[in-house]
Amino acid sequence: MNQPTVFEICAGAGGQALGLHLAGFTSVGAVEIDPNACDTLRANHPEWNVIQADVRAINGRDYQGVDLLAGGVPCPPFSIAGRQLGGEDERDLFPEALRLVAEMQPRAVLLENVPGFASAKFTDYRLRLLDQLNDLGYVPSFRVIQASDLGVPQLRPRFVLVALRERDFPNFSFHFRVRKQVTVSDALTDLMGSNAWPGVRAWEKKANDIAPTLVGGSKKHGGPDLGPTRAKQRWAELGVDGMGIADAAPGPDFPIDETPRLTVRMAARIQGFPDSWKFSGKKTAAYRQIGNAFPPPVSRFVGTRILAALQGGAANHKYPLPSESQLVLMESRSKQTKHHAKAKRLKTTAA
């Protein structure tokens, strides 16, 4: 096949875009409403068609025939940290994503969100989404993926939905073997000691575990800190002050027994971004972009699997099958039938 193409909505700082690029997709459009995030995308890939706009203003017919429509639609409507209004939340963009699927008619769809979207609270909403994708000619499948299982040094579970045409779906697999986990000390010791802080060796021993999920917040809520109270407590156990973001790594005068804060670059590593990735805007804006991103290694994994499916399964799967205990939250056909009044059965299949 020719170079596969992707059109992305809610692109943010480019975590998903970068992962899909590394998987082999060529971007034909990346929609993002935040000007700082748009500047970030342009700074890293000037050749990308970055569109600063509301998703609601995009005409999908202008991009008919794209191979993949991807997006990380806003998560507050489904987050346990929010009010969980779901479809009643004005920030819910799943309906817009479905509109674009209908207009673009891509070969594949990738949508990601917080793990709360896979909870029982949103079963009816989720099944309606799957049903609508099925009506549009797709076989949808989803899984909650723990980013730390793919080498990202934080937990960060994400709901990931992939929908493919019926002819392509049999070649798709979410399955993988858990990679060797990367700890905070593995990821950050060199940066934490880059300014000759004498306490770095003691800190390294304390930070020898997986980080909690970074939380970027929004313009209305949240600032340059590392999340809610429980997350901050966990960061403190790892030797990190979660109350804010530092301008630089601790230096020789920083007390050995004090707790340092992460820099923007350190937070980016925790999210799985390469050091070469530039972030535009001031510290708070840059951290917010990082904290709201889809980890590039997770995006790359999913993108590789989608590409394999579109190529007829020709691409070798790099990640062997996991144990049953590592598979999560798939809807059974019987549960779908129970929740649907329609006579036809969804073709949704467990991943």
Image: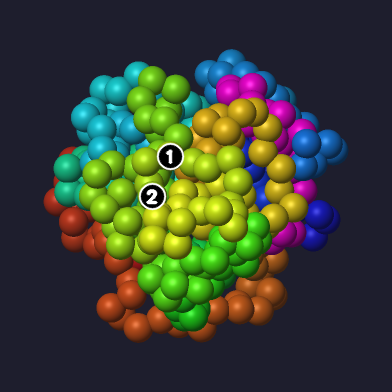
Disc 1 target residue: 244
Which mark, residue 241?
A: 2
Q: Is residue 113 visible?
A: yes
Q: Identify the residue at horizontal 65%, vertical 57% (top origin).
A: 195
Task: Please name the amino acid that badge 1 sits on.
Answer: Gly
Classify mark 2: residues with Cα within 10 Å, few (<14), some (14-19) or many (20+).
many
Q: Nearer the viewer, residue 167 or 93?
A: 93
Give coordinates of residue 236: x percent, y percent.
32, 56
Residue 100 among those drawn in magenta: no
Task: Answer with the quarter of the image where residue 91 lies.
Answer: top left
Residue 76 versus residue 143 in the image, above or below: above
Residues shaded magenta: 19-42
Going by the image, does 43 lie left or right of 90? right
Q: Residue at 71% across / 43% down in the picture?
A: 278
Q: Residue at x 60, y 77 (%)?
A: 317
- Res. 185 in view: no
Q: Secondary structure at mark 1?
A: loop
**26 in magenta:** yes
Q: Is the C-beta separation of discs 2 and 1 under 8 Å?
A: yes
**Residue 40 on image: x %, y %:** 69, 35
